[in-house]
Image (spheres, rainbow, N blue to C red):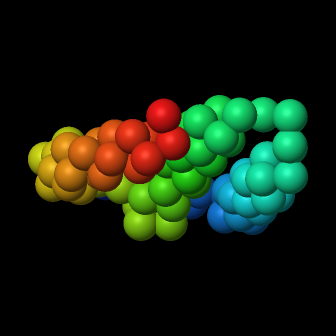
Amino acid sequence: MTAGAGEHSHPRYMLIWLYLALLTAAEVGVIYLDFLEKWMIVTSLLIMASWKALLVALYYMHLKFEPNRLRLVALAPLPAVAIMIVIIMMEYV
């Protein structure tokens, strides 16, 4: 049976879960790296958290398979997130 125009293959949930688990382990590991400066730790944690949020939104919330206009609705809060990240980074600079 072939996939039609409206159908898509199911994402590999266990593989995405493994990526999320590895990113979580990496986040925990970064905290214990005493030789890094605080801004480097905060930056790496923010990048990993953003990557995890992207994976969850794309695969578990199925945004990867939605039309572009729905993706735009999901992207609307990103300016507020950027402002919060800047405020957090100002705390450690």
Q: Nearer the viewer, residue 55 or 87?
A: 87
Q: Position of residue 41 (x, y in %)?
A: 67, 41
**Residue 81 placement (x, y as % from top left):** 29, 51
Q: Is residue 66 left or right of residue 14?
A: left
Left or right for 64, reference 77:
right
Instruction: Note whether residue 51 is visible.
Output: no
The image position of residue 65, as x and y in percent, is 37, 51
> In the figure, is residue 30 to the left or right of 88?
right
Q: Nearer the viewer, residue 85 or 19?
A: 85
Q: Residue at x 56, y 52 (%)?
A: 49
Q: Is residue 82 above or below residue 35?
A: below
Residue at 39 percent of width and 40 percent of height = 90
Q: Is residue 88 left or right of residue 44?
A: left
Residue sitting at x 78%, y 53%: 31
Quarter of the view holding residue 73 = bottom left
Please name whichever residue, 22 or 91, is drawn nearer the observer in this view of the structure: 91
Q: How many marks?
A: 0
Residue drawn at (48%, 34%) of the image: 93
| Quarter occupied by the N terminus | bottom right
